[in-house]
């Protein structure tokens, strides 16, 4: 039960994009079309889950026993960067269609703050190994949800008559603000 | 025929022409997340500027030693080292501030503004120019975060930097200090600044046209007729 709560807390109540402002760059940059937004979400979720596993292991099995907690930022970002590279190579080898679908988005994920944020939040909230994995899956699902909704709205917006100075980033931010308002309705639903 | 910009231009361009937040839309995560109050915005911008200036310094010094294939990894390592420094200093000297900024200090590592400047500028320019460029970008970032944090603090809590500026009968807009307020404020600010620039450019074009085309306009009209 607790695990399900953690999942929904990360996915909806404390949505990474709309409540914590993590992953705003891809959220604004890659939310032009539903199909590419959804692929980006899936790729990010994939990396998030692996990241939560690997960084948890590194933090609790290597850094803490040796008293090296201050190295966490350096080691986490290094792990994430090499992980993204590794995932890219594996996907290329295993599944060509998937690689073609996700290809260009994978390198972008390294600088997605949501990934490093996830690793840091797992340390901050002192989750156990299993809880960390559920948190990672939830955060990924929340990111996918937010970026797909956003892409859906933006596809409609293309046909709308937006005042010229507000085209592009400003209108995207305003829409995100209204989305964040909607997601605020979930606040207090779960308190984890 | 691209001439090299003067040193002062390297600094000034970050203030407005290439303002990281309003023009380049870089470094949005911290911009939106920490600007609940003006003081948070200032602290965040100063921390970011520190990291930006010192990583620009180091990277522009060793830019010829870094192999191109692994340059991004090398940049991120250098940036992460300075972020760790800032984080430890802030935890020791300003525990309150460090607590209210939470995980967003370590997240400076992945701030696209910093990596972007290294990739676009420091890896191609000398030490002096890179540091000036970093200082300019940092100042522009500070200005943007202060404005955003200030507006949200005034409308959301009636105060600016902790001093009350709006009278008591004003009902604080709670929305401004919630996540939605950040998106809305920045979206509106960007839109209005775009509108202002477009208006100014139009006016300049009008004056130019009047200056050069007015004497000829009767003949043009006659031909058209």
Image (cartoon, rainbow, N blue to C red):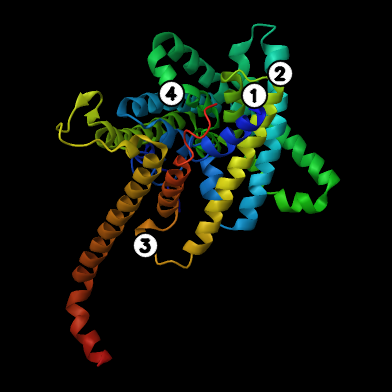
**On what subunit does the disc labeled 2 rest?**
A
State whether residue B190 is above or below residue B10.
Answer: below
Q: Residues within 10 Å of mark 2 (few under 14, many from 20)?
A: some
SS of the residue at dot 2? helix
C-alpha distance separating marks 2 and 3 = 49 Å
Residue that numbered label 2 is attached to: A58
Mark drawn on residue A76 = 1
Location of residue B42 in the rendering, given as x and y in whole percent from the top left corner? 34, 27
Lower sequence index among marks 1 and 3 = 1
Query: Do the residues under discs 1 and 2 have CB atoms within 8 angstroms?
Result: yes
Lower sequence index among marks 1 and 2 = 2
Q: Residues within 10 Å of mark 1 (few under 14, many from 20)?
A: many
**On what subunit does the disc labeled 1 rest?**
A
The lab-note entry on whether marks 4 and 2 share a chain reads no
Query: Do the residues under discs 4 and 2 have CB atoms within 8 angstroms?
Result: no
Q: State the quadrant of the N terminus of chain A.
A: top right
SS of the residue at dot 4? helix
The picture quadrant where one finds residue B115 is: top right
C-alpha distance separating marks 4 and 2 = 25 Å
Residue that numbered label 3 is attached to: A164
SS of the residue at dot 3? helix
**On what subunit does the disc labeled 4 rest?**
B
C-alpha distance separating marks 1 and 2 = 8 Å
Lower sequence index among marks 2 and 3 = 2
Q: Residues within 10 Å of mark 4 (few under 14, many from 20)?
A: some
State whether residue A112 is above or below residue B160.
Answer: below
């Amino acid at each position: 039960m607790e695990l399900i709560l953690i999942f929904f807390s990360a996915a909806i109540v404390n949505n990474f994009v709309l409540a914590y402002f993590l992953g705003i760059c891809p959220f604004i940059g890659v939310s032009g079309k539903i199909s590419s937004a959804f692929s980006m979400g899936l790729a990010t979720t994939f990396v998030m889950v692996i990241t939560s596993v690997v960084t948890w292991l590194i933090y609790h099995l290597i850094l803490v026993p040796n008293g090296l907690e201050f190295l966490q930022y350096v080691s986490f970002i290094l792990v994430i960067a090499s992980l993204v590279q590794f995932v890219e190579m594996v996907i290329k080898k295993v599944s060509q269609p998937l690689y073609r679908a996700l290809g260009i988005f994978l390198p972008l994920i390294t600088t997605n703050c949501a990934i490093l944020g996830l690793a840091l939040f797992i340390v901050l909230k002192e989750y156990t190994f299993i809880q960390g994995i559920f948190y990672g899956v939830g955060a990924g699902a929340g990111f996918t949800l937010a970026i797909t909704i956003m892409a859906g709205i933006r596809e409609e917006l293309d046909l709308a008559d937006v005042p010229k100075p507000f085209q592009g980033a400003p209108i995207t931010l305003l829409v995100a603000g209204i989305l964040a308002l909607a997601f605020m309705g979930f606040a207090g639903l779960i308190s984890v | 025929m691209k001439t090299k910009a003067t040193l002062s231009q390297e600094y000034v361009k970050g203030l407005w022409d290439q303002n990281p937040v309003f023009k380049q839309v870089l470094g949005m995560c911290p911009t939106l997340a920490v600007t609940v109050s003006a003081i948070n915005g200032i602290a965040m911008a100063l921390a970011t500027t520190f990291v930006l200036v010192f990583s620009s310094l180091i990277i522009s010094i060793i830019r010829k030693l870094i192999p191109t294939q692994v340059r991004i990894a090398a940049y991120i390592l250098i940036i992460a080292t300075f972020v760790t420094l800032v984080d430890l200093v802030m935890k020791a000297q300003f525990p309150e501030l460090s607590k209210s900024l939470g995980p967003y200090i370590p997240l400076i590592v992945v701030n696209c503004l910093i990596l972007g400047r290294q990739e676009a500028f420091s890896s191609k320019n000398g030490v002096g120019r890179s540091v000036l460029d970093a200082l300019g970008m940092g100042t522009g970032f500070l200005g943007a975060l202060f404005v955003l944090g200030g507006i949200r603090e005034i409308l959301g809590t009636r105060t600016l930097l902790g001093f009350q500026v709006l009278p008591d009968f004003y009902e604080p807009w709670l929305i401004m200090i919630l996540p939605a307020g950040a998106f809305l404020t920045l979206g509106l600010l960007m839109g209005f600044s775009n509108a202002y620039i477009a208006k100014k450019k139009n006016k300049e074009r009008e004056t130019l046209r009047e200056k050069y085309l007015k004497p000829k306009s009767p003949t043009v009209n006659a031909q058209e007729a």
